[in-house]
Image (cartoon, rainbow, N blue to C red):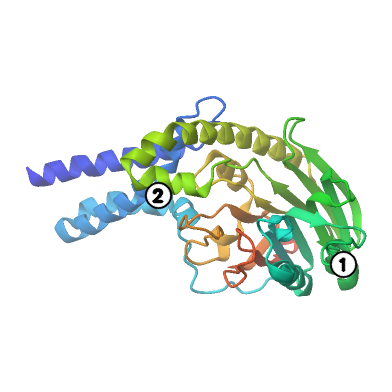
Amino acid sequence: MRRSFAFKCTLLTVAWVLLAIGALQIPPYQLWPAAFVGMSLPVALAATGAWLVYWVLRRWTVALLPLAVLVLTWPHVQRGVALHLLSPAPANGPAVRVLSANVRIFNVYRHLRDENYTTSKALIKWVAEQPADLVCLQEFYNEPQPTRENGRVFQSVQRIGEDQQRHPFVSVTLQNGIGAQFGLAIFSRYPIVHRGTIPFGRLTQNHAMFADVRLPQGDTIRIYNAHLQSMSMAEQDIVDSYSSKAGLKAKGLGLLRRFKRGLVARARQVDTLRRHMDQCRYPILFCADLNDLPYSYTYDQLADKLQNAQATAGNGVGATYNGRLPFVRIDNQFAGPQWQVENFRVHEEIPYSDHFPTSATYRLLPASKQ
């Protein structure tokens, strides 16, 4: 009787896994509650692992069922917790080092800055001195000319670009009264032969940009940089909502509305990105602050076409959010099938923004292996 009940629970868990994977394929603008089913996938996978252990100890033949499910869904397991003990043998193609970071406008606002712009200077200096060939920055900020208040602190295009022999491309979404620029930026040690922006609509400043760069070996590749719709939820509100019943009652409904709006907006934005990428004839590298989790429609649409650097070559959870919410990975790097992902790292030692920078090394595969 007990075994029969356990077997039924195992079957229900398998069904849960399949349902959650299917839910990831549903655009939130068609059926937004499906997003919550998709987000339950890591719990379903963990339960499948627990049933595997249970049946190995009880009846190994039944253990083949949860084992088969985990094997078949291993790419989904790797989205949440990656495990790569051995590095792949490097391919023969050219290597490209990429750095991506949401730099939170280099803490220029008064409520973010500290005395003498210490963290601002440290973050700009760290980014500038990294050995990356391609640098993608979200929430970028630049002051083209020195100002009376800030001096030369925020001349970030010059310091990260020109001073480091990188070609700058800044996509400006807003320019204030002193001429300071807000937006996205790509810096490349290789010549930029073509560039452009991808708007997500007139009602949002979120957008994407791309640059086609020519490698020394003659290959042309495309690098995308994007910042998708924010979750628009304050960290403290989220903490309050799950800390007590009173907090859930006071904050829950408002958080749900904002979460829904973000889900729908990001789904439309990633669809726009996918359509653009589908027209690209070059090997793709993609950096972004997705503002969405690995178990989401947004991530799933990208993972269907591209390989995620953390899932392919990283280890552990790879959390990129620098705050009170644990295990949150919303910053990602992706690469097309023409690339081998050699390594991926989250720079948790750089605490100057609310996002940790990420870096990776990619090697372009020979045409015969693409």
Q: Quadrant of residue 352?
A: bottom right
Q: Position of residue 82 (x, y in %)?
A: 48, 62
At 55% from the left and 39% from the top, the residue drawn is: 297
For badge 1, the amino acid type reads Arg
The foreground one among 148 and 324 is 148
Residue at disc 2, secondary structure: helix
Q: Can I make out residue 92 in this image?
A: no
Of the 4 image quadrants, the one containing the N terminus is top left
At mark 1, the secondary structure is loop
Q: Position of residue 244 (x, y in %)?
A: 33, 44
Residue 152, labelled with which disc? Answer: 1
Crowding at label 1, few (<14), some or many (≥20) Cα neighbours within 10 Å? some
Query: Is 187 left or right of 235, judged from the image as shown?
Result: right
Disc 1 vs disc 2: which is toward the camera?
A: 1
**Which is more toward the observer, 311 or 149?**
149
Q: Residue at x 79, y 44 (%)?
A: 280
Q: Amino acid at mark 2?
A: Pro
Q: Which mark is residue 282?
A: none
Q: Quadrant of residue 223?
A: bottom right
Q: Residues within 10 Å of mark 2 (few under 14, many from 20)?
A: some
Residue at (45, 58) in percent of width and height: 326
Query: Can you identify the residue that label 2 sits on?
Result: 42
Nearer to me, 342 or 81: 81
Mark nearer the N terminus (1 vs 2)? 2
Q: Quadrant of the C terminus?
A: bottom right
Could you tell me residue 43's position as x and y percent?
35, 48
Q: Is residue 36 left or right of residue 346?
A: left
In 3D space, how far apart are the residues under numbered discs 1 and 2 (Cα atoms)? 47 Å
- Closer-to-camera residue (178/18): 178
For this view, does 186 lie left or right of residue 74?
Answer: right
